[in-house]
Structure formats: structure tokens, C-alpha cells
């Protein structure tokens, strides 16, 4: 049986982990690159970040001022890179840190469905 995934800021649970991942992939694809997320988009991504921190016992950073979508270069083999969109959080000091929504949702799902 499929296991639901609940994200605190979203009223209805996702019927499966795959559905949650597809929702956030679509959100990422429709966001403007490099622009801070606003409204429900920001609320949803922040909720995933905070739940991820909670289930992994990672401290929730209070210096986060925004979330965004931007490109990240990732080395896939020695000297070979690919560029992909990912979520980022921004700190007060101007630092920008990438955030894997996929890993976060997987961890949240595992915590909710042991």
C-alpha cells in the first residue's frame, strides 16, 4: 500500500512520496531563477526544510531570510559536470546554500512511514 507524506504547511497529505516529489519538481520548474520565492511557494519550501531538520535532528537556522531556485553545477565524473535546478536558502550574511528537496522529502517520508 502507498504511504502518504504530510508536509505541515500543506492541508492535504500527498498520497505517495512520488506525488510529493512531483509537486515540488513542478514548483521548482515554474519559479523564476534567482528570484526569492514568495507566498505559498516560500511557505511550502520552508516547511519541507523545517520538517527535514526536525526528522534529522539538524538545527533550524534562524538566519535564513529567503528561499529561491537557481542552477547548481555538479560533478558527475572526473572533470565532467552537469547543471541542474535546485532549491537554495539564503542567509542574512548573503551566503546561498543549496538544499535537496528530494533528500528532504525522502527523509520526511521515512520518518512518517517507518
Image (cartoon, rainbow, N blue to C red):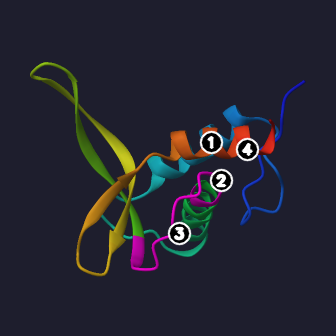
Which residues are the magenta region? 53-66
Horizontal and vertical percent position of residue 72: 26, 44
Mark 2 vs mark 4: which is more N-terminal?
2
Residue located beneath label 3 in the image: 42
Which quarter of the image is occupied by the N terminus?
top right
Mark 2: few/some/many CA within 10 Å (<14, 14-19, 20+): some
Query: Badge 1: how crowded within 10 Å, few (<14), some, or many (20+)?
Result: some
Q: CA distance from mark 3 to mark 4?
A: 23 Å
Indicate the quadrant where residue 7 lies.
bottom right
Q: Nearer the viewer, mark 3 or mark 2?
A: 2
Residue at mark 4:
111
Q: Earlier in the sequence, mark 3 or mark 4?
A: 3
- In the rendered structure, which disc, 1 or 3, sits on the residue that comes first in sequence? 3
Residue 25 visible in this rendered orientation of the protein: no
Quarter placement of the C terminus:
top right
* Residue at disc 4, secondary structure: helix
The first of marks 2 and 1 along the sequence is 2
Residue that carries the numbered disc 1 in the rendered image: 107
Q: State yes or no: residue 16 in magenta.
A: no
Q: Is residue 114 above or below residue 98?
A: above
CB contact under 8 Å: marks 2 and 4? yes
Quarter location, residue 100: top left
Are the residues flagged by discs 1 and 4 in contact, CB closer than 8 Å?
Answer: yes
SS type, badge 3: helix
User: Which label lies toward us, 1 or 3?
Assistant: 1
Q: Which residue carries the number 2 mark?
A: 55
* Viewer-proximal residue among 106 and 19: 106
- CA separation in Å, label 3 and label 2: 20 Å
Q: Position of residue 45 (x, y in %)?
A: 55, 61
The answer to whether 68 is drawn above or below residue 62 in the figure is above
Mark 3: few/some/many CA within 10 Å (<14, 14-19, 20+)? some
Q: Are marks 2 and 1 in contact (CB under 8 Å)?
A: yes
Amino acid at each position: 500500500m502507498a504511504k502518504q507524506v504530510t508536509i505541515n504547511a500543506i492541508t492535504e497529505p500527498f498520497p505517495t512520496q512520488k506525488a510529493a516529489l512531483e509537486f515540488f519538481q513542478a514548483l521548482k520548474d515554474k519559479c523564476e531563477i534567482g528570484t526569492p520565492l514568495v507566498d505559498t511557494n516560500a511557505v511550502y519550501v520552508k516547511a519541507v526544510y523545517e520538517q527535514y531538520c526536525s526528522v534529522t535532528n539538524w538545527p533550524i537556522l534562524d538566519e535564513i531570510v529567503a528561499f529561491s531556485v537557481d542552477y547548481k553545477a555538479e560533478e558527475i565524473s572526473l572533470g565532467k559536470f552537469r547543471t541542474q535546478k535546485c532549491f537554495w536558502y539564503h542567509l542574512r550574511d548573503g551566503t546561498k546554500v543549496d538544499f535537496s528537496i528530494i533528500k528532504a522529502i525522502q527523509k520526511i517520508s521515512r520518518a512518517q512511514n517507518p
